[in-house]
Amino acid sequence: MDFTLGLTALVFIMMLYVLMWDTIAMRWNSAGQHTQMEASAFFASESLLATPGEPESWEMLPHIDTNVSAIGLVNGRNELNRMKLEKLVSENATGYPSIKARLGMQRYEFGMRVTDLEGNNIYYEFGKFSSGSLNNSVNFDRFGMLDDEPVIVHMEVWGK
């Protein structure tokens, strides 16, 4: 009787341990995926707002294709170039997958919006935005200058 009771208690404790381990592993994996998404979003925003792109005059090309190795939207740090923004928006319907690849965002969806400081006027919008609030999304705002006026560049990155 003691042996059966001890064995039952041991099996119960082992099952509890396995269930707890599985829960902890799932949370750890989820946190790691969110951290990767945050890093991808940060590097994409740095590429867009800190570099002019490669080649620097990529907006003059007919399409964003293999001739464009990096996409940047600025003339100088955070000084947005209106022609580059217009080219990016015009390529939204056909070039979205290619643009995501250039930004290192193949595993995620993203949307970018340039607004005034109050967020009332949308000047430019690119990409896809999630419908509603998601647990697996990253949202952040960065400041920029568009024609010597301060603007907010809002990015939303979310998992598929």
Image (spheres, grey):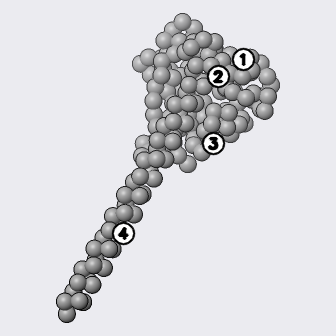
Kindly identify the amino acid type of the residue bearing the numbered disc 4: Val
How far apart are labels 3 and 2 at the CA level?
A: 17 Å
Kindly identify the amino acid type of the residue bearing the numbered disc 3: Gln
> Residue at 56% across / 14% down in the picture?
77
How far apart are labels 3 and 1 at the CA level?
A: 23 Å
How far apart are labels 4 and 2 at the CA level?
A: 48 Å
**Would you name the residue on which mark 4 appears?**
18
- In the image, residue 67 lies at what x, y percent? 79, 28
How far apart are labels 4 and 3 at the CA level?
A: 34 Å
Q: Are marks 1 and 2 in contact (CB under 8 Å)?
A: yes
**Would you name the residue on which mark 1 appears?**
56
**Would you name the residue on which mark 2 appears?**
72
> Residue at 62% across / 16% down in the picture?
74
- In the image, residue 48 lies at what x, y percent? 60, 24
Q: Do the residues labelled 1 and 4 touch (CB within 8 Å)?
A: no
Residue 22 numbered mark, or none: none
Residue 106 numbered mark, or none: 3
Label 3 crowd bin: few (<14), some (14–19), many (20+), radius 10 Å: some
Q: Which badge, 4 or 2, comes first in the chain's sequence?
A: 4
Kindly identify the amino acid type of the residue bearing the numbered disc 2: Gly
Kindly identify the amino acid type of the residue bearing the numbered disc 1: Glu
